[in-house]
Amino acid sequence: MRLFFKLLFLSITCLSGMGTQFLSLPMTARDLALGANPMLNQNGLWNPALLQSNATGSEINFSYGKGMGDLELSALGFTSPKGVLTRGLKFRYAGLSDLELREDKPQTNPLAYFSANGMAMDMTLAFAFGQQHFGITMRWIEMSLYMEKSHGLAMDFGYWRQILQKGKLGFSILNLGKMSPFISENPSLPLRVLGGISWASNFSSFSNAFYTSLEYAHLPKVGIVNIGDEIAWKNLLFQVSGKWAEENQALSAGFGLKQGLLGFQYGVQLSSQNLGLSHLFDFYILLP
């Protein structure tokens, strides 16, 4: 059985932890391409105060892709404006399948196959008082690992405001909450604190938004610097970003297309952990 636990530890740890760390993974291709920042991502994942919907109506989006080590990622979201409020509902899933249970001796076939997965349902409300923008997310979490399960509740809080007409200043606190215990341990939520600024500029038919942000992650305890840029030209979007931490660096890029009520986005990330590419596809529909 020692081999099983070694395989399990390697799979879970190297894939950023299929425990509660799945909550720190990007939900959409734009999240992946732009990196973790509390100023630009409009789905509210890194800052619930940024949740936005198209001015003409509600939006439905679906995302699917692979994380490092063949981790399966998918998400479904719905965003709807109502007056000064914007409401959002999101479902997230991250999972590993075909993990093998083996004894600590040579075997032709495993004793069993099992999976590890995490799911979350987010309900977000964003609102404004003058130039001050606020947001809050309530989250239900459920994890399954071999024969053990855990569930819990968490909350996110976010804030941003405009500065000097073309700038944004944003802060967020993510994953405040608690999980029920596994049989062998009590899972901890990956508390994160983000803060940063962004600056928008225009040239001819191009628009550009640059950001830089700092992040403190409690699980594991590490400081992270994120820098990114997004360029819009007509119906096209292009993103690039970089992440620097003590033992992990990553470079991300992406592009998107908007045409009428439909949209598409692709994002990819290469990490210094040498566990393969992460990539996500987004499809979204604007409801008239």
Image: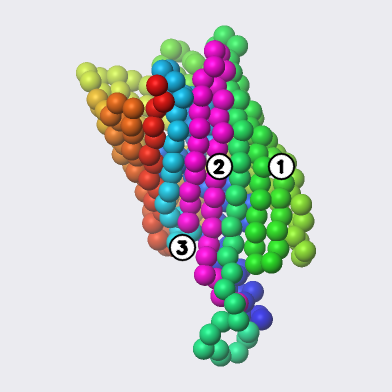
Quadrant where the N terminus is found in the figure:
bottom right
Q: Which of 89 and 185 is in front in this view?
A: 89
Span highlighted in magenta in the image: 72-101
> Pointers 2 and 1 in contact (CB under 8 A)?
no
Q: Earlier in the sequence, mark 2 or mark 1?
A: 2
Vertical relation: 147 (above or below) 187 = below
Q: Residue drawn at (55%, 71%), measured in percent from left and top?
A: 99
> Splitting the image into 4 quarters, where does residue 10 fall?
bottom right
Q: Mark 1 — residue? A: 153
Tell me the amino acid under the disc marked 2: Phe
Tell me the amino acid under the disc marked 1: Leu
Separation (CA) of disc 1 from disc 3: 27 Å
Q: Mark 3 — residue? A: 69
Q: Residue drawn at (60%, 53%), measured in percent from left and top?
A: 118
Q: Earlier in the sequence, mark 3 or mark 2?
A: 3
- Element carrying mark 2: strand
Quadrant where the C terminus is found in the figure:
top left
Residue 91 - label:
2
- Element carrying mark 1: strand
> Magenta: predominant secondary structure element?
strand
Please say whether residue 80 is one of the residues in the magenta stretch: yes
Vertical relation: 273 (above or below) 168 = below
Please say whether residue 222 is one of the residues in the magenta stretch: no
